[in-house]
Amino acid sequence: AQKITQTQPGMFVQEKEAVTLDCTYDTSDPSYGLFWYKQPSSGEMIFLIYQGSYDQQNATEGRYSLNFQKARKSANLVISASQLGDSAMYFCAMREGPGNMLTFGGGTRLMVKP
Amino acid sequence: KAGVTQTPRYLIKTRGQQVTLSCSPISGHRSVSWYQQTPGQGLQFLFEYFSETQRNKGNFPGRFSGRQFSNSRSEMNVSTLELGDSALYLCASSGGQGGRQETQYFGPGTRLLVL
């Protein structure tokens, strides 16, 4: 079974509008971390936001927020006020257990329209 | 503070050859992880090194190996290259102390093309 599922292969959003990128995960470990990364066409993965399994509040970082619904095992990324520079691939990832192994979803390609 | 650097950025090899990729982590970071990204398989974890020891290993054949030096710089080696090894190889570094919140920061990647 897929540990991280991103069901939207591609999405369009109008500039200045908000957009939600979906991510569901599967784990039996009570302690885990969820991450979102942005990958522009240049290839570098840029860290956006982190949510811990024990965190009570949804994480926020500037225009990025994470809608964390633990019971539903979902960790959706919300980007407010989209900008043209937000056009990129977005990956949801999870870390379980010790060490730094990240399991990634298949990604969502976001395209921002002017 | 300088970010993660990877060399070379682009590489073309032929089947059967071997290749070595290099990664310099962010200063002070002791953990280095390697990932392979292909259109078909997506992003897959190769291995993680911490304090010169392999701490985690993904599900890749033994042709893929790595090491870490005392200054935390890491190299990965792929021997007997196959066409399917063509990929973007990403290196990520983090402090290494562990903890759920530890964040990995990625380098720009090395694009390997095997002909």
Image: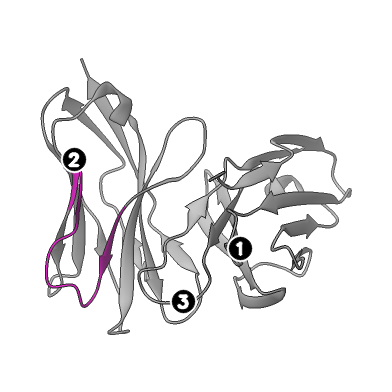
Helix, strand or loop at label 2? It is loop
The residue depicted at 79 percent of the width and 64 percent of the height is B63
Q: Is residue B115 visible?
A: no
Helix, strand or loop at label 1? It is strand
Q: Residues within 10 Å of mark 3 (few under 14, many from 20)?
A: some
Along the horizontal axis of the image, is B76 left or right of A30?
A: right
- Find disc 1 in the rendering and name its residue: B32
Q: Is residue B2 visible?
A: yes
Looking at numbered disc 1 in the image, what kind of residue is underneath it?
Val
The residue depicted at 15 percent of the width and 23 percent of the height is A14
Q: Residues within 10 Å of mark 2 (few under 14, many from 20)?
A: few
Q: Position of residue B87 (x, y in %)?
A: 63, 44
Q: Are marks 3 and 1 in contact (CB under 8 Å)?
A: no
The residue depicted at 85 percent of the width and 55 percent of the height is B80
Looking at numbered disc 3 in the image, what kind of residue is underneath it?
Gly
**Which numbered disc covers residue A63?**
2
- Find disc 3 in the rendering and name its residue: B98
Image: A53 above or below A76: below
Q: Position of residue B38 (x, y in %)?
A: 56, 46
The residue depicted at 21 percent of the width and 60 percent of the height is A75
> Which contiguous range is marked in magenta?
A49-65
Can residue A88 be found in the magenta stretch?
no
